[in-house]
Image: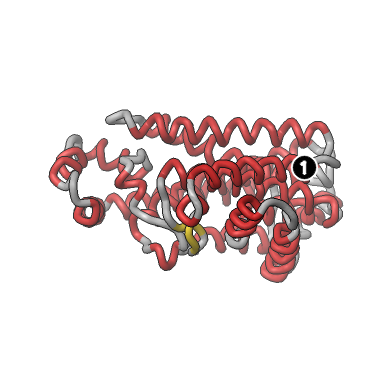
Amino acid sequence: MKFCLREKNIILGLIDLNKTIIKYKNIINKELSSVYPVGPELLKNPINHILNGGKRVRPLLCMLVNNACGGKLEKSVKPALSIELLHIFSLVHDDIMDNDSLRHGIPTIHQKWNNSIAILSGDAILALAFRELNSSTNLIKQKFNSALIAVCEGQALDIEYQNIDKISLKQYFDMINLKTAYMLGLSAEIGALLAIDDHEIVENFRKIGFLIGKVFQIQDDLLEITSDSSIMGKSLSSDIILNKKTYLMIKAEEKFPGMLDNIYKKNNKNQILLKKEIVSFLKENNLILETKDYISKIFKEIDDLLISSEIKNENILDLINFIKQRKS
């Protein structure tokens, strides 16, 4: 596709990305700090506890795309805030389901309080997300509702697959597309919709966001295996302990049928040895390198989409490089 001169200038408008990221992140953090200032202590404290941390990738993507499309900053803040609150809601409930003890380097709500408080806090955070959307258009509200359903469906598949011995890569991608990619795609899409009425440009941004979400989840799966909790700021090893179906584990089963089952049976009473042996197995058989290669292919797909859409600017590449180089 080709943009007219004004549209090209709009796309080239992702200026001073690092400075913009800092500025926008500070805006979101400030909004989050005051999103629920008054309420019962057993609700206010856990909510503000978990709101205090995170990369803010989703609201940043929304605000940056809106800026790129010539939109007004003040119009993007509330929708971006809603997107982040929806994400945090999903994390609170995800931590309960995975029994994770750390999030953003601090205890999870259910760990610091209890499951009941965590469920209640997550529900309240979701309500806050809808409240911030009050002034948005019906179209954006509809898209937000669709994203909420998609996230829940993706989480349901994640749980379902834990009880299935084998799943295909297609099933895995179906899951992460719903659980993670959909929301990143929506973040970019809403950012564009707030500024312009051009379906082709909006759709291209949505596709880019979707691919960013897809690669982000596969990176998470890999970092769960290769990083440590001090860097990630969250509990690790739950993917292995819960026998979650990740790209790594699916490829391992495809190439070496039955080997993972043997490792699980051998170490079913010792979680530390289980993780150690699985990580060694993945490294020795080049499965970690293979996953990194696949991640690189998705980034190439993003690059190709940028080129075909004539979205040529160093600042979008800076954002993508930031995600490429993430360690947590």
Relative to 140, does residue 276 appear above or below in the rendering? below
Q: Looking at the picture, does residue 50 appear above or below residue 196?
A: below
* Residue 177 % position (x, y): 52, 37
**44 w.r.t. 256: above or below:** below
Query: Crowding at label 1, few (<14), some or many (≥20) Cα neighbours within 10 Å?
Result: few
Query: In the figure, is residue 16 to the left or right of 113?
Result: right
Q: State whether residue 1 appears in this view.
A: no
Determine if residue 252 is in view: yes
Determine the residue positioned at 68% across, 46% down.
83
**Vertical position of residue 235 compared to residue 141: above or below:** below
Residue at image point 50% right, 53% down: 113
Residue closer to the observer: 47 or 318 = 47
Instruction: List x then y, in percent, for residue 314.
Output: 66, 63
247 vs 79, nearest the viewer = 79
Q: Residue at x 66, y 43 (%)?
A: 124
What is the x, y in percent for residue 155? 49, 35
Residue at 40% over, 56% down: 235
